[in-house]
Image: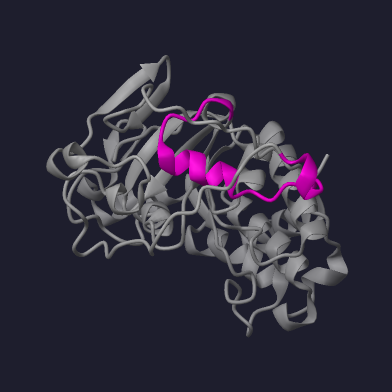
Amino acid sequence: MSFDVFPGETLGVIGESGSGKSTVSRAVAQLVEPTAGKVWFRGQSVFDLSMTQRREMRRHIQMVFQDPHSALDPRMTIWQSVCEPQRVQRVGCTADQREHALQLLERVGLTESHAKRYPHELSGGQKQRVSIARALSLQPDLMLCDEPVSALDVALQADIMNLFAELQAEFGLAYLFITHDLSVVAHIADRIGVMYLGQFMELGSIDEIIDHPAHPYTDALIKAQPVALPSYLRTNERVHLQGDIPSPIDPPSGCRFRTRCPYAEDRCSAEVPEWREVSPGHWVACHFAGQIQLGASNSGRTSVGS
């Protein structure tokens, strides 16, 4: 798989559990080293750098993890956790680090009284705000968001998503935003990549993907999205995919989605689909893209905030 994240944009990545979304984000964050391929940042291959150069580059790539409860050290106060990246990178003196941490906590909606507490004294939404403040402490250019709202209830999801949008506008951040919830990614993303079993099935603008899906897997994800309407008013029928996602250790031959695809033919098992551009900026890996009729009447645009 190959993709770019441009300055100031949000690239959303969606897919089922086990499709490899988190592994991609961890490879970009240099937490795991890919067995093949390269990760480039500002024209440099990050895994070809020395440890000193890699440490410096890590300042510009920060991550917000899925579980806010395990992301914070229970032995450290909140302000110590937010100061920690600055201390590790030797940015400023202790007083400056503390002042900067308090400013960031205030920016994400917390107060100085929160800074003196320990993680167990905060709610899940407050802990995720702390994680966001900590990720911002080194003024990164790229933030990797690995399902950052999936552990929160719907009301808190809306607040956190709106906070992400505000921070992006304020600091010019780029996001690689990973989620399994189409309504979440539709709210924040500029482009979206649909991932299945370690590969992109489709990639394009959010409007193009949702309104004109070219891959059967994308169509199935869109139609699986809940719609807040009585059943007699719904115009779409859900696509029921048979079976579970195959093992990534031994993926199917040809198209990896063919074992669950309702449109699969013999060609799908014999040939790997070409990654091709079906319209400007809209890429898909399917032999029959444009030939099969995919009706995405469920737009997936359920809002999580305003």
**In magenta segment, residue 227:** yes
**Horizontal relation, residue 275 to residue 166: left or right:** left
Measuring from the top left, give residue 123's x and y in whole percent. 78, 73
Q: In this view, does 9 lie above or below 109?
A: above
Residue at 54 percent of width and 61 percent of height: 85
Question: Farthest front residue?
Answer: 232
The quadrant in which residue 272 appears is top left
Is 127 above or below relative to 240? below
Q: Would residue 193 appear left or right of 102 to someone viewing this image?
A: left
Q: Residue at x 64, y 69 (%)?
A: 68
Q: Measured along the vertical axis of the image, is residue 154 above or below residue 286? A: below
**Residue at image coords 69%, 63%:** 128
Please give the name of the residue rendered at 78% of the width and 69% of the height, measured from the top-left corner: 115
- Determine which quarter of the picture holds residue 127: bottom right
In this view, the residue in front, 217 or 38, is 217
Give the quarter of the figure containing the C terminus: top right
Q: Give the range drawn in magenta.
A: 211-234
Q: Where is residue 205 in the image (x, y as percent from the top left)?
A: 52, 26
User: Residue 303's spot in the image, x, y percent?
Assistant: 76, 42
Which quadrant: the N terminus?
Answer: top left
Residue 153 appears left or right of 10: right
